[in-house]
């Protein structure tokens, strides 16, 4: 299976799962792990093995993909992974989606992102953080009466454009800018569930993904060269 097929299979699997399923993006996390491993990283956790609990300033937060160092022995089928004493997060990935009511969801996504990354950065300022988000241009909205409404044409184009601008402004965490709440890189996966081909632009999405993984690994290599 090539990259395009693997990514499409991961997205379709997630989109076909119930909205309340916390494991809906496991295959997308597996895809991310494979692309990071292809760049020389070892010991990544998450994906189909389950989210990884990492201690933040306020509480333990679950991450879709994590690299904890030093690498401690873990069972081959170990699930419900939690950071062990002595381990520190070196790389964390959070995968989100906006598949319904974009006007109400988008502001919350930015607030959630800043909050979750700030919490872990207070304890581990050297950690590298990536953020992936699936945006559906076929997402239903809500009328004034709270009834779901199907979008027409490019209903969410402007809202998603502003959201992507916010992400770009946050994805600048590198020396000397170490402000909490910023991240190293983001990846936007734009789909339209109204169309059979799914992707708005599959090649552009794959290319952006490779740039995303390159940026994360480059940041990590600069901070933790011994991991390679």
Image: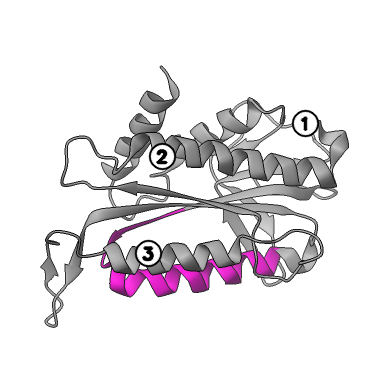
The residue range painted magenta reads 96-120
154 lies left or right of 102: left
* Residue 21 at x, y percent in the picture: 36, 50
Label 1 secondary element:
loop
Q: On the image, numbered disc 1 is attached to which residue? A: 73
Please say whether residue 104 is one of the residues in the magenta stretch: yes
Q: Position of residue 171 (x, y in %)?
A: 61, 60
Q: Which mark is residue 161?
A: 3
* Quarter placement of the N terminus: top left
How far is disc 3 from disc 1 in space, using C-alphas? 43 Å
- For the residues marked 2 and 3, what is the alpha-carbon distance in whole angstroms? 16 Å
In what element is the residue under mark 2? helix
Left or right for 116, reference 176: left
Residue 59 seen in the figure: no
Magenta segment's dominant SS is: helix
Residue for badge 2: 204
Give residue 109's position: percent from left, percent from top: 45, 67
Q: Is residue 157 above or below residue 9?
A: below
157 vs 179, left or right, is left
Would you say residue 29 sits in the magenta stretch?
no
**In the drawing, does residue 94 fall left or right of residue 24?**
right
Q: Which tag, 2 or 3, sits closer to the chain's start?
A: 3
């Amino acid at each position: 299976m090539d990259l395009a097929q693997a990514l499409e299979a991961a997205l379709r699997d997630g989109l076909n799962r119930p909205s309340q399923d916390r494991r809906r993006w496991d295959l997308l996390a597996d895809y991310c792990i494979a692309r990071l491993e292809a760049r020389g990283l070892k010991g990544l956790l998450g994906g189909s093995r389950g989210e990884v609990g990492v201690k933040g300033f306020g509480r333990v937060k679950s991450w879709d993909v994590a690299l904890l160092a030093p690498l401690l022995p873990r069972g081959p089928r170990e699930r419900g992974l939690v950071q062990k004493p002595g381990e520190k997060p070196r790389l964390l990935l959070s995968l989100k989606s906006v598949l319904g009511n974009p006007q109400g969801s988008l502001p919350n996504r930015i607030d959630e992102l800043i909050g979750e990354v700030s919490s872990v950065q207070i304890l581990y300022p050297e950690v590298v953080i990536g953020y992936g988000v699936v945006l559906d241009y076929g997402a239903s909205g809500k009328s004034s009466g709270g009834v779901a409404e199907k979008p027409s044409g490019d209903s969410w184009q402007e809202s998603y454009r502003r959201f992507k601008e916010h992400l770009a402004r946050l994805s600048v965490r590198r020396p000397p800018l170490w402000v909490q709440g910023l991240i190293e890189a983001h990846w936007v996966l734009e789909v339209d569930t109204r169309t059979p081909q799914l992707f708005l632009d599959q090649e552009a999405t794959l290319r952006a993904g490779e740039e995303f993984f390159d940026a994360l690994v480059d940041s990590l290599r600069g901070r933790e060269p011994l991991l390679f």
